[in-house]
């Protein structure tokens, strides 16, 4: 009993968080790679994604992957948000957050002086980054919903500026997610024990 | 923590970590797929196994058909646009090049109507033009992602189906076309107020490139669900599939 409570205290990331994190990574990976193949069918801008990094083999296959993984992303994301808010972890880990604290932490980070002594608490840069990716993924899901069902969700469609604007919102939200991922992976490479914590919890 | 290798071993650590990741991820996948109704995904969860992944994705696509049928509000209208927003020229799209579009003889044309209908007589073009007409300026959304706004005129399809005494409780309406294209739609979409048996485009007789003499226009469906050069319409309870749908596009294909 004593041992168990000691273990719980040591836990940085509870099991539900680790599970939803890796499921989200799987879903986002499938969605991004199949999404690039869908983009290539009718590029919005003057470039295409190399077919070697896309998923699905052709437009029809990519659409099947995309419309399968969307359920995983949305369902898993909803579970994550509910558990995060319901357990109080959201308030505890991500707030308070202020512009001045963010500025101070950002300066420190750029000078290589931002401390990571306690993996249990997030600094302002981390708080901002993780809140950003939550909002960005929500925007990805909502804009995707408009592209999929533009007639059935008129309010959402108009809020996002109509079908064609929603295409661009969807694209740039994906780009935002990739930017987050680049920083996220760079930080994990610098601090490999954070990867370990996301796998075994401690 | 003291068992952690030094930083230079970071790569090895990542590899080890990924190995450890494998089992919990799989377990979790199982659990989540139960709640998401994506159990079928499991049969193909190995990315390397093309055949079973394909089967699983097909199954999810059919589940998505049911979800979309459930989401579809038969009274919800697609947005309409002012004339100033019409896309000109309106893009051509088919599984063949524009020069291969079939040339249908207007005088010899007969629209066959069959299946669960009481009036199976074949329609001439003048007969179709004599029916009450309407028009709409709506957005055509292609499965590739692009969209274009066009003006379409013709006979409300629900009026046509009632006129031929179609069984409106049947599941499917199927189409066979002069370019060997074929597709089928659900009855609620067939009866949607904006579903149009189209005879004209942009105020003129439907040009060859857009499906002369007859196409079905549905602003609630993606482009590949809108058949051109229609020769036969049938009402059925047996799933008829479609040219692209049989190759993997989602059958409901609606927005």
Image (cartoon, rainbow, N blue to C red):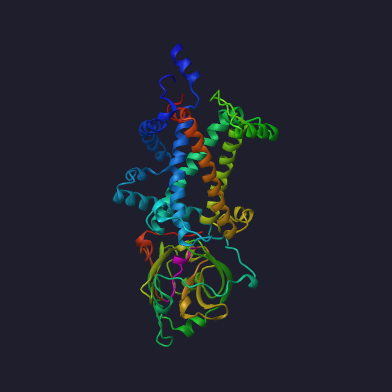
Is A53 placed left or right of A140 in the picture?
A: left
Residue A112 in which image quadrant: top right
List x then y, in percent, for residue B199: 50, 78
Residue farthest to the right, as pictured = A100
List x then y, in percent, for residue A76: 48, 39
Is A137 placed left or right of B98 in the picture?
A: right
Q: Nearer the viewer, residue B198 or B2?
A: B2
Q: Nearer the viewer, residue A110 or B113?
A: A110
Residue B227 part of the magenta-drawn span: yes
- The segment highlighted magenta reads B221-229
Query: Can residue B112 be seen?
Result: yes
Residue B78 in which image quadrant: bottom right
The quadrant in which the N terminus of chain B is found is: top left
List x then y, in percent, for residue B153: 55, 76
Against B176, is A148 above or below? Answer: above
Q: What secondary structure prevails in the magenta region?
A: loop
């Amino acid at each position: 009993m004593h041992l168990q409570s000691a273990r719980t205290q040591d836990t940085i990331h509870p099991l539900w968080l680790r599970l939803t994190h890796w499921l989200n990574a799987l879903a986002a990976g499938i969605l991004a790679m199949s999404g690039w193949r869908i983009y290539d069918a009718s590029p919005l801008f003057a470039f295409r994604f190399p077919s070697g990094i896309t998923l699905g083999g052709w437009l029809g296959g990519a659409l099947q992957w995309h419309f399968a993984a969307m359920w995983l992303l949305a369902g898993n994301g909803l579970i994550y948000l509910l558990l995060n808010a319901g357990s109080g972890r959201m308030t505890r880990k991500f707030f308070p957050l202020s512009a001045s604290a963010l500025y101070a932490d950002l300066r420190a980070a750029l000078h290589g002086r931002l401390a990571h002594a306690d993996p249990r608490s997030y600094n302002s840069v981390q708080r901002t980054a993780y809140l950003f990716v939550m909002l960005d993924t929500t925007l990805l899901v909502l804009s995707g919903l408009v592209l999929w069902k533009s007639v059935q969700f008129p309010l959402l469609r108009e809020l996002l500026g109509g079908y064609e604007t929603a295409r661009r919102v969807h694209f740039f939200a994906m780009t935002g997610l990739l930017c987050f991922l680049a920083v996220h992976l760079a930080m994990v490479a610098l601090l490999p024990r954070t990867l370990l914590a996301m796998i075994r919890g401690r | 923590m003291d068992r952690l290798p030094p930083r230079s071993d970071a790569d090895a650590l990542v590899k080890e970590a990924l190995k450890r990741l494998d089992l919990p991820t799989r377990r979790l996948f199982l659990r989540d797929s139960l709640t998401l109704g994506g159990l079928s995904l499991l049969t193909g969860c190995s990315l390397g196994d093309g055949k079973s992944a394909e089967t699983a994705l097909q199954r999810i696509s059919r589940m998505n058909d049911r979800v979309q049928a459930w989401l579809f509000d038969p009274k919800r209208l697609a947005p309409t646009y002012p004339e100033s927003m019409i896309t000109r020229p309106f893009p051509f799209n088919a599984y063949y090049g524009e020069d291969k579009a079939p040339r249908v003889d207007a005088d010899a044309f007969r629209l066959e109507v069959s299946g669960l209908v009481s009036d199976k007589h074949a329609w001439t073009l003048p007969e179709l033009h004599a029916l009450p007409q309407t028009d709409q300026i709506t957005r055509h959304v292609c499965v590739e992602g692009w969209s274009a706004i066009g003006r379409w005129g013709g006979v409300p399809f629900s009026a046509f189906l009632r006129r031929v005494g179609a069984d409106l409780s049947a599941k499917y309406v199927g189409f066979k076309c002069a370019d060997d294209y074929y597709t089928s739609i659900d009855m609620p979409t067939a009866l949607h107020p904006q579903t149009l048996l189209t005879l004209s485009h942009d105020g003129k007789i439907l040009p060859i490139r857009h499906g002369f003499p007859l196409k079905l226009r549905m602003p609630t469906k993606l482009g590949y669900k809108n058949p051109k050069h229609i020769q036969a319409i049938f009402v059925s309870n047996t799933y008829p599939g479609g040219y692209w749908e049989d190759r993997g596009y989602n059958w409901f294909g609606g927005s």
